[in-house]
Amino acid sequence: MKRSAIFAAALASTLAVPALADGFILTSPDIAEGQQLSNDSVFQGFGCEGGNVAPALEWSGAPEGTESFAVTVYDPDAPTGSGWWHWFAFNIPADVTSMPAGSVVSGVQLTNDYGATGFGGACPPPGEVHRYQFTVHALGTTLEIDNSVSNALAGFMVNANSLASATITAVYNR
């Protein structure tokens, strides 16, 4: 019953989402658009040997009305039929505009698709190049969900309440 109420509220709020704001940007000293991730951001396990450290992220130009942020890292190329969630954090306070490399998020973090809470680095199958979409969303609310929801439901809620988003897509292959 609780999930249907959340879904209904999200659907209603989707109809009232304003246009995306210009000028909201995401930068990083550790990753760059279209560039290979360093070994620091590679998973330790599943046949991969890396640092499993989230890169530093910085954002600016959040639109007026931003009440919180969400940060996601998603691999749309994972051979699962539904991609792979490497990181999903939300309800990051509106006064936070950066996260140092390997930082602990002030907000709610979900279990990633490795089965752990927090960041899980890149680890595509050998011989494949995968894209890793690092996205920050400026949200017009604080989400009324907790860390027990799926990444898909949280993604729906984030997209339904996003005022603006900015993405850096890095790649990795082994």
Image (tube, grey):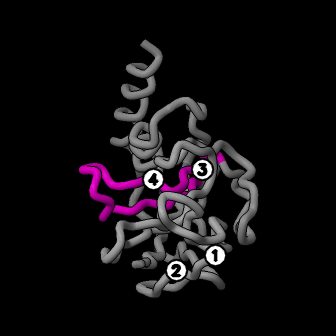
Are dots 2 and 1 in contact, CB under 8 Å?
A: yes
Residue at the spot 35% in from the left edge and 72% down from the top edge: 126
Query: Which amino acid type corresponds to the residue marked 3 in the rendered image?
Result: Ala
Q: Which residues are magenta?
A: 70-91
| Disc 3 crowd, CA 10 A, few/some/many (<14, 14-19, 20+) | many
What amino acid is found at the position of numbered circle 4 in the picture? Answer: Trp
x%, y% of residue 117?
Answer: 62, 45
Is the Cβ of the residue at disc 3 closer than 8 Å to that at disc 4? no
Between the C-alphas of marks 3 and 4, the distance is 11 Å
Residue corresponding to mark 1: 40
Mark 3 — residue? 89
User: Can residue 57 be seen here?
Assistant: no
Magenta stretch containing residue 104, yes or no?
A: no
Residue 136 position, x and y percent, is 54, 63
Residue indicated by mark 2: 37
Residue 101 sits in which quadrant?
bottom right
Say which label, 4 or 2, has the lower sequence index.
2
Numbered circle sitting on residue 85: 4
Q: Nearer the viewer, mark 1 or mark 4?
A: 1
